[in-house]
Image (cartoon, rainbow, N blue to C red):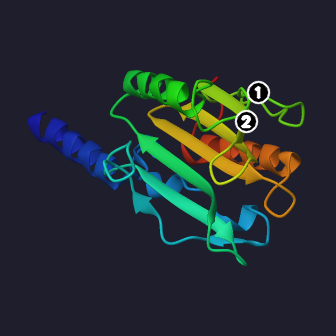
Amino acid sequence: MVPLLLGSLIGMLSITSCQSPSKQDLATQDLLLPLEILPPSWELSGAPRPMGPSIGFGDEDDTYISFKLQSEKYIISDHFVLFYSNENQANNGYEDLYRSEFNDNSIAIDTLWQTPPELSYTSSYAAQFYMACTINNVAGPKQICKVMGQYGKYVTIFYSIIQSDTMSLSEFNDVAQFLDEMMVQKLGLLGSR
C-alpha cells in the first residue's frame, strides 16, 4: 500500500513540475504592447526598462516601454505594466495610480480629464478600467489620452499624444481594446467573469 501511495505521490509531483507556470506569473515585459499594433510611423524609443525610483513609481519587477515617431526624437507614448503580490495590493495600487494619473488638479493640464465619445471601448474583464483625455500644457498644449486597467495582480497604463501625425482618438480606442484583449488572453482571464 505504501509503495502504491508513494508512487502516486511521485507521479503527481512529476506532472505538477512539468506543467507550465501559471499565466498569472508572467513577467511584466511579456505584457507590453507590440509595436506592430501601433501606427506604422511609430518606433520603439529604446528597449523595455524596469521601473522604480528612477522614474518615480513602480519597482524593479515592473516594466515600461516608450514609443516615438520614426521622424522625431521625442517620446509620444509610454506603456507601463506593474505587478503586485496579490489582487488586493493591485487594487490599492490602481486606486493610488488613478489619483495621480488622472489628477484634475495638476498644473500640467489645461482641462479636466474627460472621456470623449470616440473612446467608447469598455472592458468586461478588467477589475477596474478607465480611459480619458486632457490638454497637457508641458512643452506646448497637446491632447493626451490614457487608458488604465487592473487585471488580477497587474495594472497597465498606456498613454499617447493625440494629434494628426501620432494617433487619432479612434486609433487610441482600438489600442485600448487590443491591450484589454491581450491582457485577458495572456493572463487566461476568458470566462472568469
Three-letter residue code for mark 2: Thr
Element type at marker 2?
strand
> Are circles 2 and 1 on residues that touch, CB within 8 Å?
yes
Name the image quarter holding the N terminus.
top left
Residue sitting nearer the eye, 181 or 69:
69
Residue at mark 2 to residue at mark 1: CA–CA distance: 7 Å
In the displayed structure, 132 sits above or below 161; it is above
Q: Residue at x 60, y 34 (%)?
A: 149
Q: Quadrant of residue 190?
A: top right
Q: Residues within 10 Å of mark 1 (few under 14, many from 20)?
A: some
Could you say where residue 118 lies in the image, as x and y percent from the top left?
A: 89, 37
What residue lies at 62% left-to-right and 46% top-to-bottom?
Answer: 158
Task: Look at the image and tell me in which quarter the C terminus lies.
Answer: top right
Q: Residue at the spot x=53%, y=52% of the render? A: 31
> Is 113 positioned to the left or the right of 46 in the image?
right
What number is the disc on residue 114? 1
Mark number, residue 56: none
In the image, is 99 to the left or to the right of 74? left
Q: Indicate the position of residue 152 as horizontal and vertical percent values.
A: 49, 31
Picture residue at 74% right of the left edge, 47% below the top? 141
Q: Position of residue 36 (x, y in %)?
A: 72, 67
> Label 2 belongs to which residue?
134
Q: Is residue 182 visible?
A: no
Residue 126 position within the rendered picture, expressed as x and y whole percent measured from the top left: 62, 29
- Please, what secondary structure does the residue beneath circle 1 have? loop
Q: How many marks?
A: 2
In the rendered view, would you say 100 is above or below 6? Answer: above
